[in-house]
Amino acid sequence: MNKSNSSNDWLFEITPKNKFFSLNLKEVWQYRDLLFLFVKRDVITVYKQTVLGPLWYLIQPLFTSVTFTIIFNNVAGISTGSVPPFLFNLAGITVWNYFTACLTGTSDTFKANAAIFGKVYFPRIITPLSLVISNLIKFGIQFLIFIIFYVFYYFNGSNLSLNISVIFFPFLIVIMGVLGLGLGMLISSLVTKYRDFTNLIGFGIQLLMYLSAVMYPMELVKEKLPKFGWILEYNPLAYTIETTRYMLLNIGSISIPGLVYTILFTTAVFFIGLLFFNRTEKSFIDTV
């Protein structure tokens, strides 16, 4: 019997790419229309069937800020200096929300998009990247609310001022987005094999928030609980949030070594997450 259909007779053979760290930026640009379509989908569909719609973007940070102000500032007596406690908390929460939105959104990439990934090809990195971009719109709305309250307190006699370093504030947002993207890609890759990570994400984010100086100054922990100060010193999110308040409210301090550590940590996490993401996309359809 003539075996004319052997593997050596095929003209082309499609195999996965072996570049684990490849971002495929050229290919992502070619699929930019699809990227914008995903961004539009992420913005519209999330609150399409809700009563309040985009107002949830405003309600969540406002209620959280009020709660933190009552519990941590009024009850626990944490001082925020000359800055109104509500504004102090709102600044940290606004930046923190962008990070968590990027992390939670991208951490479910493979499971949530398995049906699409199994039918048509496009650069898989587009899906988590679209979430990071669409969450910028949510962040912009919440930051606008912060500006409104900032102006309100300023004209009501509060001692508020911007630090000159505020021009680098967009850079901090990029760091938060990239860090959330890197961790999200890593978790999403692990979720395809270990579903327990899905249940741990919510609890982990809540715990991480209390360890990231969202509702208190970093110096307070170093002063009151010096034995636990090292936790903040190794937490890049704490440096980012502390720097945010320094830029926007001119309160606290800025740590150049801490920011350098944050940038290096974020870069490492992003490439590790990309490595796992690129490896998982080749075989995840068999495990999801």
Image: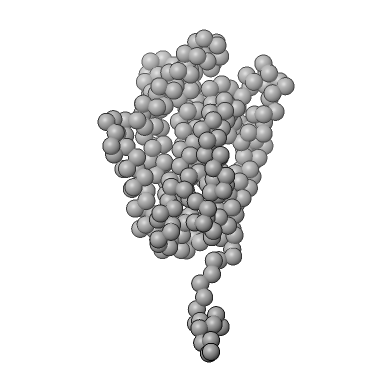
Residue placed most toward the observer, 189 or 258: 189
Residue 229 pos. (x, y %):
68, 25
At x 52%, y 39%, the residue is: 198
With respect to residue 147, does 288 lie above or below? below
In the rendered structure, the answer to whether residue 168 lies left or right of residue 61 reads right
Q: Is residue 9 visible?
A: no
* Residue at 40% across, 54% down: 115
Which quarter of the picture shows residue 86? top left
The single residue placed furthest to the front in the displayed view is 1
Q: Position of residue 140 (x, y in %)?
A: 39, 37
Q: Residue furthest toward the right? A: 227
Residue 203, given in percent of the width and then of the height, sits at 54, 30
Is residue 18 rendered to the left or right of residue 67? right
Instruction: Where is residue 286? Give x, y as percent.
Output: 51, 56
Q: Residue at x 47, y 13 (%)?
A: 70
Q: Quadrant of residue 32?
A: bottom left
Q: Residue 166, relative to residue 210: is it above or below?
A: below
